[in-house]
Image (tube, rainbow, N blue to C red):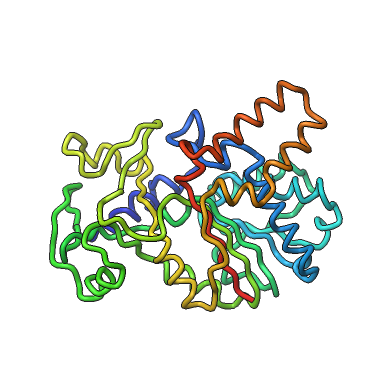
Amino acid sequence: MNFAQYMNEWLYGDDGYYTSFKNIGKEGDFYTAVSSSRFFGASIANFLLKLISQDESKANGVLVEIGAHRGYLICDMIQWIYTVNPTLIQTLRFAIIEKHPRLIEEQKAYIYSRFGDDVKVEHFGSISEIKTNYAFVVSNEIFDAFGCELYMDGKIATVENDVISWIPAPNDMIELGKKHHLTKGEIAVGYEEFASEFKNLPKCDFVSFDYGEKYIRNDFSIRIYKEHKTYPLFDENIKLKDFFGNSDITYDVNFAHVIEAFEANSFHLKTFETQARALISFGIIDILEQFARIATQERYISEADKIKTLISPTIMGDKFKMIHLSKD
């Protein structure tokens, strides 16, 4: 099978890595910005509040998270919205895009533990199912979880019995490689279909965080994460069957490909910048200062350290990027 099919089975098959709840953080295979600090979600919610202040009609829209894991991010956003402007809880709708029943049940349980019956979060299988005049859509680390083809000098990887080999690439893959000046690396599969699911939304702001660059680097970045250790896919000392389905597999995002897919569906790029710059512009430092006025010194220091993880150039701050795409 082609590598994209193999990767999809690895992550989303019947016993795939993402088809059941996985711990993220110290007890899991990796950390994310969401697991690092609740201020991550609060700062994105702060940005949504700014957009609503500029266009009050957006107060009647839907806040949507895609790839919600257990629901931490959307809950952190709802909590901050309630703290700043409780009336918006009555006008905004909240939704999660999730296809796997087991994850939906995990998410419902966690949301109830945070808000009881006071907040309703709807579940949909696709963004195309949501009917609204405006949606603010947020995601964290979803584009690196799309299946990808491995491309090198006009050939693509195939996998048989967990062993990689190479065959001539189809013409459309070769043309895509030429278009992006790619001779060696990953070509994501599914960005175009995903972006097309947004076409029925009259207005939308889509904010997403992921690791990668706006331009390709002509090298393989694909790697496996297990118990906070990184294994390059082409490491001759590893056996793929030992990791298949029980570990994460990912690669650096080519954001130019993401932008191209969304621009073909009436979106335009508003902002592309590092996670550090984005969170600071969203007001994460101001939120921390507000927290300092009500928290103990010990709690303030603890939260400040977590925020350093999010914005430090040597940790997450520069490696992760924020992309804001808008349709109006």
Which quadrant of the figure contains the N terminus? Answer: bottom left
| Image-based side of 170 in relation to 315, left or right | left
Looking at the picture, tell me which residue is in the foreground, 326 or 66: 326
Is residue 5 in sight in this rendering? no
Asked if residue 165 is positioned above or below residue 136 in the image, the reply reads: above
Which residue is at the far right? 87
At a point 37% along the width and 35% down the height, the residue shown is 226
Which quadrant of the figure contains the C terminus? Answer: bottom right
At a point 60% along the width and 47% down the height, the residue shown is 105
At a point 54% along the width and 48% down the height, the residue shown is 275
At a point 68% along the width and 60% down the height, the residue shown is 63
> What x and y, as percent, mark residue 238?
21, 36
> What x and y, as percent, mark residue 56?
80, 68
Asked if residue 313 is positioned above or below residue 54 in the image, the reply reads: above
Is residue 240 in sight in this rendering? yes
| Image-based side of 300 in relation to 143, left or right | right
> What x and y, as percent, mark residue 113?
71, 39
Asked if residue 60 is positioned above or below residue 30 in the image, the reply reads: below
| Image-based side of 150 in relation to 266, left or right | left
> What x and y, as percent, mark residue 16?
38, 47
| Image-based side of 189 in relation to 32, left or right | left
Numbered disc total: 0
Which residue is at the far top? 298
Looking at the picture, tell me which residue is in the foreground, 265 or 194: 265
Looking at the picture, tell me which residue is in the foreground, 242 or 149: 149
